[in-house]
Amino acid sequence: MNKPVLWKFLVPLAIGVGLCLMPVPQGLQPAAWFYFAVFAAVVTGLVLEPIPAAAIGIMGVTLSAVLLLVDPKPAGSLRWALSGFSNSIVWLIFIAFMFAKGYENTGLGRRIGLHLVRLLGKDTLGLGYAIALADLVIAPFTPSVTARSGGTIYPIIKNIPPLYDSYPGESGRKIGSCLMWVAVSTACITSSMFLTALAPNLLAIDLLAKVAKINLSWMDWFLGVLPVGLILFLLNPYLSYKIYPPQIRTSDDVPAWASAELAKMGPMGRKEITMAVLAVLALILWIFGAELFKLDATVVALMVFCAMILLHVISWDDVVTNKAAWNVLVWFGTLVTLADGLKLVKFLDWFATSAAGAMQGLPIAAILLSLVVIFFLVHYMFASLTAHTTALLPVFMAAAIAVPDMPVKIIAMMFCFSLGIMGVISPYAAGQSPIFFGSGYLPSKDFWRLGLIFGAIYLCVLLGVGYPYLTMIVRI
């Protein structure tokens, strides 16, 4: 093993062992502290990636299960270790890859991509704004960001980079990497902009009503986040273009070439029409299915997935040979398990209580902003926005309510508005992230770096624009 790879193994190991050797913090059980050490080592390994991320995740889960850190009973420990693979979002992500395969097999994805390039392909920035606008249009009606971004946007835009000779790997930076980042990050912004654009938003509203007796309507949410959402939405494609620039910025020839290719393709064939009908059906059921038929987004995806096989849009060989899909399934399944373990060992409760206690005596504004920052950054420990909301929103709200003179409604809205945008920080932070990460256009080091940069930008806008704005409108 050469030195450049060896240090990537040693750093996560050193962090894990170092934390284990430290005294167990007061108020925390030894097993919980040791589990956090394993989790910290796994996250470090995911950043450095000395071996594939899925393998790192399996090792972390296996070690925790062997040491009985989450459940002292072997049978319970095994149930916990495998629990992530029964998570609905994990399977929705997996099926999104199958949707993409359907677009590819039928040629529908290429056709849509060619149309976009024909209309907007002269300018890469224009393509970025087109992708962002597509997400914005369907966001208010699609509570599953995984279905919206991963199941609808991704299968279409993955067909655009090859038109510019941009593929996963070195040529990804021609245009594919930038467009993928625009898509995955825009989905985080639109998820915060609308109450109904993200399932955890609806969960948060329910929790606020129970914990703090605060009731927010759809319009309360929209008006409260409007300036933050508009600023981030309008800036995001441009920032992506500047911070993660494509090598191809303008091309006068490509739109003409796209028109010629469309002419060669001719009218839509039967399989293309079949895929288009199934895609529209999925979108309609994702928007209205939960309310009308009590259909979960993953159940809808499974229904369409089965139809794709029956109608020969994809074959079973397409399913079993899709390495990217299975890799993400294993990787994200283990991360969901590991993140859930932090809640089960009570580490998150201890962390939130300790953080709130350490801020006693500070000015109210400082406490409020600090709690929001911590609430945002702690998402590095989660592989699910729903889990984050369920585990931490009641705890942080209880800590805020306990502070004298705290503007409870303002901090509640700040917590809620951060739920979507915090999904940008890591390759596992939101449901759509593993799909775009698995595309091959966003290398691990780039995703973590961009997540840190854009996460900081989003948080600064939320604090610098959102907080002063809320102090004005909430008093009205």
Image: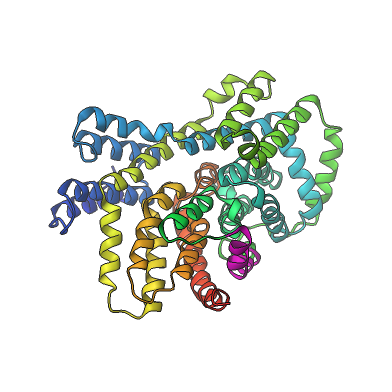
**Residue for point 51% across, 35% down:** 324
Nearer to me, 371 or 244: 371
Q: Position of residue 55 (x, y in %)?
A: 35, 37
Question: Does 391 sit left or right of 299 as displayed?
Answer: left
Relative height, residue 68 to residue 403 (above, below): above
Indicate the position of residue 116 as horizontal and vertical percent values: 76, 49
Q: Is residue 179 left or right of residue 52?
A: right
Quarter of the image with the N terminus in it: top left
Residue at image point 31% right, 34% down: 80
Determine if residue 7 is in view.
no
Q: Where is residue 328 in the image (x, y as percent from the top left)?
A: 47, 37
Residue 70 visible at all = yes
Direction from residue 264 to residue 68 in the image, left or right: left
The magenta segment is 217-236
Q: Does the magenta run of residues contain 225?
A: yes
State the residue lying farthest toward the front.
Answer: 213
**Residue 29 place in picture, x, y as percent:** 17, 50
Classify residue 160 by image quadrant.
top right
Placement of 426 over or under 80, stated as above or below: below
- Image quadrant of residue 154? top right
Horizontal arrangement in the rendering, residue 257 relative to residue 42 (left or right): right
**Is-magenta flag for residue 197?**
no
**Most common SS among magenta residues:** helix
